Amino acid sequence: MVTGRAERKDGVVSDPPGRKAVRSDLEQVFRTTYPRVIAVAARVLGSRDEAEDVAQEVFLTFGRSSVPVGEASGWLSVAAAHTALNHLRSNRRRASREEAANGGDAVCPDVADAVVTRDERRRVRAALGLLPRKQAVALVLRHSGLSYAEIAAALDLSPGSVGTTVRRAESALRKELNRHASSD
């Protein structure tokens, strides 16, 4: 044990005043849940590099939280989805500001954007960022391989309402995609 630190019964290591405590079980939780956190964030963002940034942010927050270890997996999955959606939204706002700063001229498109699948993925991510948060998170978690029971626990829903939430999210996503397709 490091001098000046003490472990409490709840597994949180206390630091001297002025520094926040870091969980003693963080490494164990990190090792078991990192792949899932990366998968959820990457599904939203489409970039492993950005997903790793999100994972770092999520684990830092978790490390200073008092979330029970039994709820860590669901909490981290939802936090990854929320944080990734926030990144999507902030990237979209930044792109709008850059376009406005360039006098409305579009920024030179990346060569990869010419590929149809990349363009469609971008459209889906943009539409996903416009959905109500709970629907977007439920959809991302379901398509990341989580069961209805895991999604229900993570989002504090009844297992029976997860299917309805996912179907509504899929319907809203289709509407957003169709709306944007007709305006292109």
Image (cartoon, grey):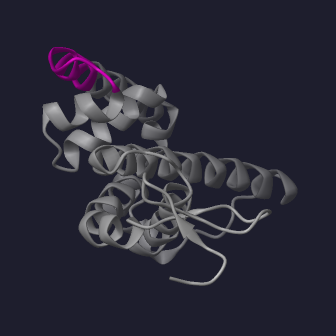
Measured along the vertical axis of the image, is residue 4 above or below residue 41?
below
Residue 32 visible in the displayed image = yes
Q: Nearer the viewer, residue 151 or 117?
A: 151
Instruction: Provide the residue span drawn in magenta.
Output: 156-167
Left or right, 36 with reference to 17: left
Question: In the figure, 58 relative to 141: above or below?
Answer: below
- Name the foreground residue: 140 vs 1: 1
Q: Nearer the viewer, residue 64 or 96?
A: 64
Question: Residue at image x 43%, y 66%?
Answer: 51
Please indicate whether residue 152 sits to the left or right of residue 176 in the image. left
Return the x and y of residue 149 as percentages of the image width and height. 15, 32
Rendering coords of residue 177 (x, y %): 38, 33
Considering the whole magenta stretch, tell me its main secondary structure: helix
x and y percent of residue 86 in the render?
A: 57, 47
Query: Residue 108 lies in what quarter of the image?
Result: bottom right
Residue 116 visible from this viewpoint = no
Left or right of 71: which side holds 163? left
Residue at (43, 45) in percent of width and height:
67
Which residue is found at the position 18% from the left and 44% from the top?
146
